[in-house]
């Protein structure tokens, strides 16, 4: 869905081009890459899809559009991307954030150059950004549990976070938002989505989960082609803490599930 939205938005960008903005009249990525010599060494303003992905190599580019999986993950630039140097981080706060990348439509101004740029010099074009603004504002909706006792025999998610050592190695029952997207499997205090329900993300400091029963997933929010699952659940299992859990060992605690129930 995100890939289609970005692609469909390209004609919309074209209809508003040349009308100017706080950064001045703009070009489009395809204008620049079709005739790079005409813009080499010049200060230009360009509209396109910004994509940043961490890793090896890192990606920081301006492209025609973005292609993603159904869950918004594995974002890839379309067309011939332009490497972006010094893109301002504060502009990214209202972009799409599926979990492994940041992307959205932007208007950037900066010095254009041709040569060998980015990791391994693999990009023939670069803009050294002097200013940037969003064309597309992404608004998110949050659903969260309350910080309140759950009753006898149960431990709240927030109590686990405040006093993890007190419950280390114990079998407990708690509640929270289960989130799965093929990369991460966590219990969180909440989940945020874009206004149309797409691109869900866990909130706060999640607990890594193992053993969540697949037969509970159909009772939760399931993405197209099973691209993600999330929803409010009550789980029973063994809690462990001490760090080094989950993907890249990045999670402080682990919850190994023995039973789970979807909550409405």
Image (cartoon, helix red, strand yellow):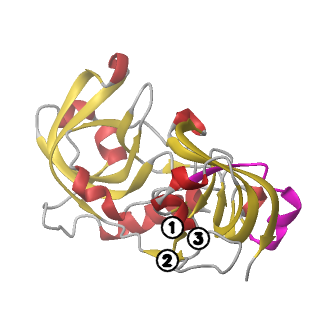
With respect to residue 189, does 71 lie above or below? Answer: above
Q: Nearer the viewer, residue 149 or 185?
A: 149
Highlighted magenta segment, given as a residue range: 207-220
Q: Mark 2 or mark 1, which is nearer the start of the sequence? A: 2
In this image, 183 relative to 195: left or right?
right
Q: Which mark is residue 156?
A: 3
In the picture of the structure, the residue carrying the numbered disc 1 is: 158
Q: CA distance from mark 2 to mark 3?
A: 7 Å
Label 1 and label 2: CA atoms lie apart by 6 Å
The x, y position of residue 63, in whole percent, is 40, 45
- Marks 2 and 3, the one that precedes in the sequence: 2
Question: Pointers 1 and 2 in contact (CB under 8 A)?
Answer: yes
Q: Is residue 107 visible?
A: yes
As helix, strand or loop, the secondary structure at mark 2 comes to loop
Badge 2: few (under 14), some or many (20 or more) residues near its Cα, within 10 Å? few
- The reply to whether discs 1 and 3 touch (Cβ–Cβ < 8 Å) is yes
Residue depicted at x 28% and y 41%: 32
Residue 227 left/right relative to 7: right
Task: Give above or below for 179 relative to 242.
Answer: below
The quadrant the C terminus occupies is bottom right
Q: CA distance from mark 1 to mark 3?
A: 5 Å
The total number of labels drawn is 3
Residue for point 44% across, 31% down: 55
Percent across and percent down for residue 219 are: 81, 73
Residue 17: x and y in percent read 28, 64
CB contact under 8 Å: marks 2 and 3: yes
Q: Which residue is mark 2?
A: 147
């Amino acid at each position: 869905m995100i890939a289609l939205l970005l692609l469909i938005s390209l004609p919309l960008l074209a209809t508003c081009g040349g009308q100017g903005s706080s950064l001045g009249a703009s070009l489009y990525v395809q204008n620049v890459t079709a005739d790079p010599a005409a813009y080499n060494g010049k200060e230009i303003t360009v509209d396109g899809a910004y994509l940043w992905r961490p890793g090896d190599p890192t990606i920081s580019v301006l492209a025609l559009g973005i292609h993603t999986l159904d869950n918004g993950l594995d974002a890839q630039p379309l067309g011939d991307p332009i490497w972006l140097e010094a893109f301002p981080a504060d502009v990214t706060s209202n972009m799409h954030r599926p979990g492994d990348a940041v992307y959205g439509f932007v208007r950037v101004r900066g010095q254009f150059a041709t040569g060998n740029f980015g990791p391994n010099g693999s990009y023939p074009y670069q803009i050294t950004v002097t200013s940037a603004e969003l064309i597309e504002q992404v608004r998110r909706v949050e659903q969260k549990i309350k910080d309140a006792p759950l009753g006898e025999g149960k431990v709240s998610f927030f109590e686990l976070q405040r006093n993890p050592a007190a419950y280390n190695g114990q079998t407990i029952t708690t509640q929270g938002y289960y989130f799965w997207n093929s990369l991460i499997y966590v219990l969180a205090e909440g989940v945020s989505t874009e206004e149309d329900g797409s691109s869900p993300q866990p909130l706060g400091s999640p607990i890594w989960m193992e053993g969540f029963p697949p037969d509970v997933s159909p009772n939760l929010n399931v993405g197209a082609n099973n691209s993600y699952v999330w929803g409010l659940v009550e789980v029973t299992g063994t809690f462990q803490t001490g760090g080094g859990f989950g993907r890249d060992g990045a999670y402080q605690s682990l919850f190994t599930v023995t039973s789970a129930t979807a909550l409405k």
